[in-house]
Image (tube, rainbow, N blue to C red):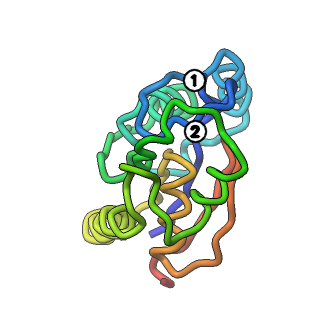
Amino acid sequence: MELTLLRHAESEYNKKGLLQGRIDCDLSAEGIEQTKKRAMNFDSSNYDVCFTSPLKRTLKTAQILVPDLEIICDDRIIERSLGDFEDTPTSDEKKFLLNNIDSTPPNGESTAEITKRVEEFIEFLKANYSDKRVLVISHAGIVYALQVSLGLEVKSIDNLETLTIDVNKK
């Protein structure tokens, strides 16, 4: 299975410098325009199916980017709950805590919880889409967890950036 991970376009919260986690904010006007521009040279025929988080920012990115592809929402790839950090300004201290794999935001989701649901998602894909080219439009936290779960070197990706993985070799 070829798995391509793509982080959603800029959200309203990204633009304001706020941490969003599970807050269901939409794409910013600029994020919508960025996605439309990216869609002009994004070939959806390279994929058989698209999975997204159920949050608006990922679903809207998918609807603009791959409107002719089957889009399936899956709760296992929803963004990490940031607990008390949600709806607060980004700070260096919070970034440090969120980038430390062993830390858990106050009243948020632990690394073990994220890893468990992401691993379940990977196993589901292997069982049901092993011979497919799968596009997953999700969040930075989930892209990170997917890389960790697959034993890859972790690379951060920006909005609308992709990372392709041959899961059969993992």
Q: Choose the circle earlier in sequence order: 1 or 2.
A: 2
In this rendering, would 119 be left or right of 167? left
Along the line of sight, which residue is nearer the eye, 112 or 73?
A: 112
Q: Secondary structure at mark 1?
A: loop
Tell me residue 37's x, y (percent). 73, 26
Residue shown at 57%/37% (left/top)? 19
Tell me residue 29's x, y (percent). 66, 15
The quarter holding residue 72 reads top left
Q: If the image is split into quadrants, where does the N terminus sit?
A: bottom left
Tell me residue 71's x, y (percent). 38, 38
Tell me if I can see residue 50 in this picture.
Answer: no
**What's the amino acid at mark 1?**
Leu
Q: Which residue is label 1 attached to?
A: 27
Q: Secondary structure at mark 2?
A: loop
Along the line of sight, which residue is nearer the eye, 55 or 88?
A: 88
**What's the amino acid at mark 2?**
His
The reply to whether discs 1 and 2 touch (Cβ–Cβ < 8 Å) is yes
Residue 139, label in figure: none
The quarter holding residue 149 reads bottom left
